[in-house]
């Protein structure tokens, strides 16, 4: 029993760190593509430019509208959830987070499928909509995929944890007639 408890607490702490780290990443970097440029100091804009150039990320360099729609969902739906999830997982044992965590996981993984597919299979030549910007070699593609992959894998782990953990599977109490 003690091993199960410590494994659960370890995973809850990992998830707490994931959600905590996601707050500054979303606010300081991801949302630069959808919020007014003036909200960000030049240092943060330059850091994003460095990342885009270094990792050849075409999605953040010149975000297509479909990608901006995902970022808007991140702003409106996910960002408010991050501090709540951070609290729930650091505190531990908060069964009330289960439904929201399942919805978050399914939503996030669904958005990552077209993102990862684009990074792996898109033709980034000058003839494409990406104007020649993007990874050219398999190594560059896999490096960029490794940046995005945790945002698929950790929600998958969260989904499985919420669905399979006996602790988070609770029975609804039925009212007696």
Image: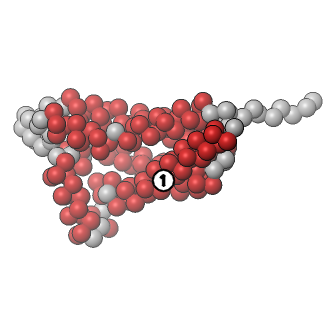
Residue depicted at x 53% and y 32%: 160
- Name the quadrant of the C terminus: top right
In the image, residue 87 sits, relative to residue 113, either above or below, namely below
* Residue at 47% from the left image edge and 56% from the top image edge: 20
Q: Residue at x 53, y 34 (%)?
A: 159
Q: Residue furthest left?
A: 126
Q: Nearer the viewer, residue 10 or 169?
A: 10
- Quarter residue 132 falls in: top left
- State which quarter of the image contains the N terminus: top right
Position of residue 32 measured from the top left corner of the image (x, y, whole percent): 30, 58
> Left or right of 54: which side holds 17?
right
Q: Which residue is mark 1?
A: 17
**147 sits to left or right of 24:** left
Q: Pointer 1: residues within 10 angstroms few (<14), some, or many (20+)?
A: some
Choose top left, top right, bottom left or bottom right for residue 146: top left
The residue positioned 83% from the left and 32% from the top of the image is 174
Residue 60 visible within the image: yes
Q: Nearer the viewer, residue 74 or 112?
A: 112
Asked whether the viewer can see residue 103, the reply is: no
């Amino acid at each position: 029993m003690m091993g199960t408890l410590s494994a659960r607490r370890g995973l809850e702490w990992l998830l707490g760190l994931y959600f905590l780290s996601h707050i500054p990443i979303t606010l300081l970097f991801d949302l630069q593509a959808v919020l007014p440029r003036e909200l960000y100091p030049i240092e943060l804009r330059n850091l994003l430019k460095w990342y885009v150039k270094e990792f050849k990320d075409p999605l953040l360099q010149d975000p297509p509208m479909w990608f901006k729609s995902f970022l808007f969902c991140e702003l409106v739906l996910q960002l408010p959830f991050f501090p709540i999830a951070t609290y729930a997982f650091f505190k531990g044992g908060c069964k009330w987070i289960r439904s929201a965590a399942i919805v978050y996981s399914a939503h996030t993984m669904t958005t990552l499928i077209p993102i990862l597919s684009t990074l792996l299979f898109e033709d980034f030549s000058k003839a494409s909509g990406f104007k020649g910007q993007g990874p050219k070699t398999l190594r560059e593609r896999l490096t960029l995929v490794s940046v995005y992959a945790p945002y698929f894998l950790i929600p998958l782990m969260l989904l499985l944890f919420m669905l399979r953990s006996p602790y988070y599977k609770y029975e609804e109490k039925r009212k007696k007639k």
